[in-house]
Amino acid sequence: MFNLNVMKINMVVNISVALSLYLIAITSLGWSQEAKIPETIDKIELLQNQLSINPKNVEIRLELAQLYLKIENYRSASIEYQEIINSYNQQQDVATIIQANYGLGLSYAGLEKYEDAIVFYKKAILYNPNRAHIHAAYGAALFQLHRYDDALKVYTIAYGIEPQDIMILHQLGNIYSKLGNTSMAIEFQEKVISLQPSFAEAYYQLGLLYAKENRYNDSIAAYEKAYIEDSELIQSLYNLSQVYLRIGNRDVAIEKMQLFQERKAIIEPLNKLKGALQRSNNRIEKAKIQANIARYYLNIYDYERAVVEYEKAIGFNSKVVEAYNGIGIAYMMLNRFPEAIKSQQKAIALNPEFANAYASIALLYLKQKKYELALNHYRQAISISVKNAENRNLSLEFESYKKIGLILISQKSYLDAISAFQASIQINPDDSEIHYNIGLAYANEEKYQNALSSISKAIEIYKHDQGRNTKDPFKSDIKPGFLSGMYLILGELNEKLYDPDNAKLAYINADTAQSYNALAQLTTKLADKNNQIKNQMLKEALSYANHAIELDSSIASLYNTRAIISFKLGEWEIAEKSIKKAIELEPNNPIYQEGLNQILKK
């Protein structure tokens, strides 16, 4: 039987730095930061259900508000926090009213209502003036209102309470910079770096500050580090270009500017989406924009971040089907298959005609070798797509038929596999991989002429595509060595069909250790049938065997082939040396041991 070397395909303008990082500060008021973001949406649904049963439960409402805040659904958070404040009575724990006022302040800051935010920060401080993060959030709101002197006073209080807090130090540096006190600004940003050497924004600010003091080498180093730590901080590249121009290094300045333009073209769409999200006041619209932000991170392979951003989209609107699908894809890429399936199933629950979710679940089952479940879901995906005549997803159908064929060929259901592959060909007749797999299926059915035609077609398409150097949206990325593998199979098929000349040509075109080994064996067989030129042909076979070993000296069978040919030529020492090398590589192979015994007898 032929080796089933089937190609397997893998599917698969911020509000302010101060605000976004100070959302973490709510942990100091009792909310466990260790709650994993992937569990957030499930927890929100659970809390909403609990609250509908017991609407007066402050603890549930407070936890729900905190979760809304975490996924940046500021409007929903503000509603829950306001409800807690309105229902507060003196018998309740004072920590609750502090959390509610602080949380409401953060919510208003997220909505860019900084004056309203300040009102509630002040109320929280009245209850407890010793919470550094509340002072810091208050200072951040003042900073956003350009009230830098007032912000400095408030941040100084926060600093007195928490002198090692990274964000407090960073914001103090920013305020001093705005007030024109460069030396103090540098001092605080350098403190940040000493405590947290990976803080990109601090390096960026230091780049600006060093440049002001004409410390250009320090500025360059700071900007470089900022970009290393955060590749989305592309303004670092632009500023680097400007600094290099100042010191007269025009070539590097141009290089950095070109990199800035390249990265800007990639980052700009993300920044536009973030800006649109910030401007929108419509919850449904926000959910769509947020899902697009998440897709950006999915497309750049940042799967953890993609999950977080998709969770935010669901926080705005729990019926965003694409978000559940996106989370499922991200989890799949993270090899978290049960969570991925659960997320795709949620997408199907919202839209039972969502073919992509069925195809995604099918792939997840395929990766877990649950082949029957995979087949069922691929067929369901195809069925849904076919029924949707106006918006058929031909790419999905093509890929699903291909995967069905791969599963069936692995189960040795070769004729059924051929039918599935042929359905793929009806959608896209110019996929070399499909024709190759059909050829393998025919070969295993011993229909060698059909197999030969399919493999030949696969090679023809592949070489044509390589010549055009184009990217077909239906085609998957072909692994290196694919063409060589096809030629190797072609050689074997020609041998089966008693066509040694074409077999030889195919093996030479494959140009691998395995193909030259096969060529050596074929030539040896032909030599045994032709006594007149037997020695001449055996020497030719030996040259092929030697070339195979030159291409890969780590394969035991190649030395075994050389040993057999040398034995036939009467070159006993070469034969003995070769078979001993084969045994060294595979000491437990009984065939090689028997070969050595035969050679030693001679």
Image (spheres, rainbow, N blue to C red):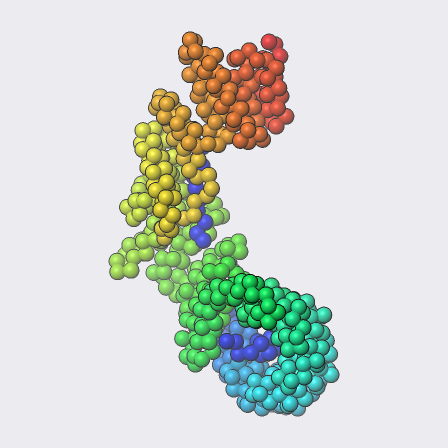
User: Please, is residue 176 above or below residue 405 in the view?
Assistant: below
Q: In front: 299, or 540?
A: 540
Picture residue at 50% right of the left edge, 55% below the top = 333
User: Please, is residue 206 above or below residue 397 in the view?
Assistant: below
Residue 254 x, y percent position in the rendering = 53, 64
Toward the left, the furthest residue is 389
User: Please, is residue 208 above or below residue 568 in the view?
Assistant: below
Toward the front, the furthest residue is 248
Q: In front: 413, or 117?
A: 117
Residue 106 at least partly seen = yes
Residue 489 x, y percent position in the rendering = 41, 31
Residue 572 x, y percent position in the rendering = 59, 13
- The answer to whether residue 174 is left or right of residue 407 is right
- The answer to whether residue 464 is left or right of residue 261 is left
User: Please, is residue 33 above or below residue 59 in the view?
Assistant: above
Picture residue at 36% right of the left edge, 57% below the top = 355
Q: In front: 219, or 191?
A: 219
- The answer to whether residue 28 is left or right of residue 392 is right
Picture residue at 56% right of the left edge, 65% below the top = 250
Residue 139 x, y percent position in the rendering = 63, 85
Quadrant containing the N terminus is top left
Picture residue at 46% right of the left edge, 39% below the top = 481
Residue 509: quarter of image: top left
- The answer to whether residue 197 is left or right of residue 48 is right
Quadrant containing the C terminus is top right
The number of numbered discs placed on residues in the rendered structure image is 0
Residue 133 at least partly seen = no
